[in-house]
Amino acid sequence: MKLELKHIASHLPYNLQFKIFGQIRLYNWGANVENVMSLIDYGKPILHPLSDLIKEIEINGEWFVPIEKLFDIETECNWSCSDYTVLNSNQNEYWVSIKDVPSNAFGYNANENYFYYTSNECPRIVTKQLELFQKLYEWHFDVDNLIENELAIDINTL
């Protein structure tokens, strides 16, 4: 498998970093197509593995746990004021609940590429799938398994 534009296109509007010839370069959205193709041919994008969804990360000087922020976006509530509890997340599922209301849980299933939400232990439809995925791309999460396929670099290894 070879890195192609389709693999990184959704990340490009958000200042994607590449490692090219041992140096880290920031992709500028205004760059021309030849520059992008050069980055793809000779470099690898730097992405967060999905396991970072339940860890505190830094984006533009702000520290947060992404799955908690995504939960806030979906519910249009600021649950961040509460304490969160990471639930039994495994390699392909990442879940969080509100400590005061453990029956309200929110998660992402990487096998199905879908966000889930339960309220009082009843499944609810996550209505903002597109908006949540846009956030994953904005925060440079590897939703396409590029790291696993050695087409991208795990940001935690730099």
Image: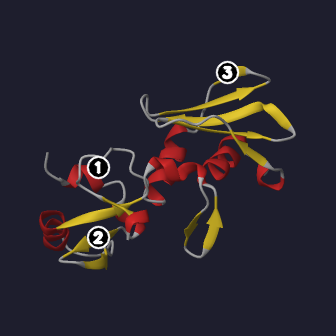
Q: Residue beneath label 3, please?
A: 123
Residue at x 54%, y 45% (from the top left corner): 132
In the image, what residue occupies the spot 74% across and 43% down? 85
Residue type at the position of mark 2: Phe
Q: Secondary structure at mark 3?
A: strand
The N terminus lies in quadrant: top left
Q: Residues within 10 Å of mark 1 (few under 14, many from 20)?
A: many
Q: Is residue 56 visible?
A: yes
Give the CA separation, mark 1 to mark 2.
13 Å
Q: Position of residue 113 (x, y in %)?
A: 44, 34
> Marks 2/3: CA distance?
39 Å
Say if 44 sits above or below 27 in the image: above
Please give the label number shown on residue 18: 2
Dot 1 corresponds to which residue? 146
Looking at marks 2 and 3 on the same chain, the residue that comes earlier in the sequence is marked by 2
3 or 1: tag closer to the N-terminus:
3
